[in-house]
Amino acid sequence: MKTKYCGVLGVSFSPNKYHLVTGGEDNTCRVWDLRKKKSLYTIPAHSKLISQVKFEPQEGYFLVTASSDMTSKVWSGRDFKPVKTLSGHEAKVNSLDISEDAQYIVTVSHDWTIKLWRGSSNGGEDRMDMD
């Protein structure tokens, strides 16, 4: 698939492998249909570049973006609408991951902290400082 979209910093396949999501320097997240070989959605996701994107690993119910704007955001995997903003880091968010059971999201920041976010109904956030 050739495209003029440059500056891609993060990429993730949906669990069914029909979609690809990219995030990059233009502060947007793009959802690509691999069968049609075209962009389906452009999400104006953040105010600064997107460092990483990731689909929920089981069914793709949601995706998460990490950004230099010091936040990560959770988006619906069905209509790509915002679900929640994960804020609290004091510097850019470099990386993220989602647990296999989708109960936790972990974010890593340039502020030397790791935050573990619970996706369960009791909510909350746990933090761990890096040495």
Image: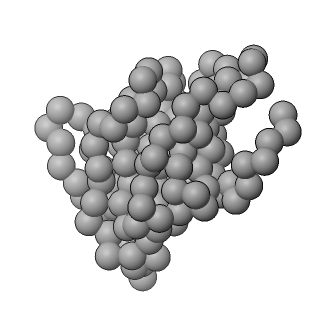
- Give the x, y percent position of residue 3: 80, 42
**Left or right: where 65 falls relative to 38:** left
Q: Residue at the far left: name it.
A: 122
Percent of width and height locating residue 5: 72, 49
Rendered image quadrant of residue 104: top left
Would residue 7 appear left or right of 92 to someone viewing this image? right
Direction from residue 115 to residue 18 in the image, left or right: right
In the image, residue 51 lies at what x, y percent? 56, 60
* Along the viewing direction, whichever of 57 and 55 lies nearer the viewer: 55
Q: Height in image: 84 above or below 90?
A: above
Residue at image location 62% in from the left, 44% down from the top: 22
Q: Closest to the observer: 47 or 109?
A: 47
Which one is nearer the viewer's eye here, 89 or 122?
A: 89
Q: In which quarter of the image is the N terminus?
A: top right
Q: Which residue is at 52% across, 56% downward? A: 27
At 43% from the left and 30% from the top, the residue drawn is 80
- Is 44 on the left or on the right of 12, as rendered? left
Q: How many marks?
A: 0
Residue 91 figure quarter: bottom left
Above or below, 97 against 9 in this view is above
Q: What is the quadrant of the C terminus in the image?
A: bottom left
The residue sitting at 48% across, 41% down in the picture is 43
Residue 70, position in %: x, y? 37, 67
